[in-house]
Amino acid sequence: MSRKIVILCLTSLLILVSIATSVFVEESKAATEITFQYIGGTVPNVDGVINEAIDKFQQENPGITVKTIYVDWGNAHSQFMNSIMAGMAPDIGMLAGTWAVEFVETGALADIEKYVSKGLIDSFIPSGFSAMTGTDGKKYGLPWDGCTWGLFYRTDLFEKAGLTQPPKTWEELVEFGKKLTNEKTSGLVFPAAGWEPDDYFLPFLWQAGANVCEFKDGKWVGTFNKPEAKVAVQYYYDLVNKHKITPKTITGMDWEACKNTFVAGDAAMMVNGMWVIGAIKGSNPELDGKWATAMMPAGPGGIAALSYPNTMHITQQSKNKEAAGKFLDFFYSKGYYDKFCIQSGVFAFTKDFAKSDYAQDKLLKPFVELAQYGKNRPSAPKYEQFRQLFFNAAIQKLIANNITPDDFCEQMNKAFNDVHK
């Protein structure tokens, strides 16, 4: 073989190697794919924000692609659980309410502070991290779209009763409730149907300075035996059975039934979720100017309300944690997060959101302000089991006067401790 042929062969080989290397490098640049499991995919305006953010992120980060996995609310928990168990967890996953608690406990979620900026962490209201903060103090996710539960009241019925402002304390809640209660109208309603009772009972515990449980000496223990808890249970019981400003029929009422009762004028006050504002405004124009919203009344322990966001996480199984963190930083810091929450009709759990024009709406504002007093369901890993098997049923018995406040406290403390042995 001549020298020229050898040189030609070597040159061709080098060219081929160079091309292959170039192709490999180009493929490597686009090789990082983030899977983003998100509950939704059915509301065009909301999903449009997600898709807009992904398109812009991919333009600015050509080496990273984001693949969305839309799931519905009914299957979201089981699908996330199954993906974890199968070792096929998404890089980023959205969870609802307090679901994060159990996944934090099992180690399925990554320490988020390792992968997003400190500025992003510091931008949130601290209470937004309650469901995703481990007993080690680390944060395992970010707040997503949030909601608060507050007080609604009929200004027209207040005016007839000679009342000019909503109640600000437990004492005023009872006093005003008595003035508003008659043969047609109940002073106060709140949902206490099948799966909802604890959501509307917990604020009374918190307003008394109490809680369901505490983490002590390395384990979760019930705290219904504390004096503050007994004060809350007695007050709740008395609203129905002593003061009679709340009807026993609430055991058959969910949030929508309470809303309908309020709209019909059969209830002068109502505790309900922030989304109900839109439900009333959108379909009952005849009520314009006849109702308003307010902060929750303060108990002996101060103001407190149920208020929490859904949550967003990087999973421990993710092999692309840095890229996932980069996408989350982009989504939250470039205005897409606020835009998403506004399109959803809820609010962002950021410190600055309360100053936004959206949050200044006179009906929304009390709910946004309540977020700083917000609390979530307990972070105990078996709380969900406790509430379904014991807590909700006992709350309904308390309303129906089938159990005394003292017996309620004793039984709930025992049930909680038994579940968490």
Image: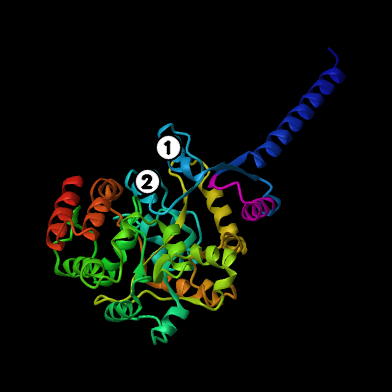
The picture places residue 333, in percent across and down from the top left corner, at 58, 63
Q: Label 2, on which residue?
A: 103
The N terminus lies in quadrant: top right
Whether residue 126 is visible: no
Look at the image and give the residue range highlighted in magenta. Answer: 37-55
Is 141 in front, or is 182?
A: 182
Residue 221 relative to residue 326: left or right: left
Whether residue 279 is visible: yes
Q: Where on the picture, by quarter, is residue 338?
A: bottom right
Q: Label 1, on which residue?
A: 84
In the rendered image, the vertical position of residue 248 relative to residue 150, given as above or below: above
The amino acid beneath tag 2 is Phe
The picture places residue 152, in percent across and down from the top left corner, at 43, 72
In the rendered image, the vertical position of residue 81 relative to residue 257, given as above or below: above
Residue 325 relative to residue 60: left or right: left
Is 402 in front, or is 308?
A: 402
In the rendered image, the vertical position of residue 10 relative to residue 393, given as above or below: above
Number of disc labels:
2
Mark 1 secondary-structure assignment = helix
In the rendered image, the vertical position of residue 316 relative to residue 98, given as above or below: above
The picture places residue 348, in percent across and down from the top left corner, at 52, 65
Mark 2 secondary-structure assignment = helix
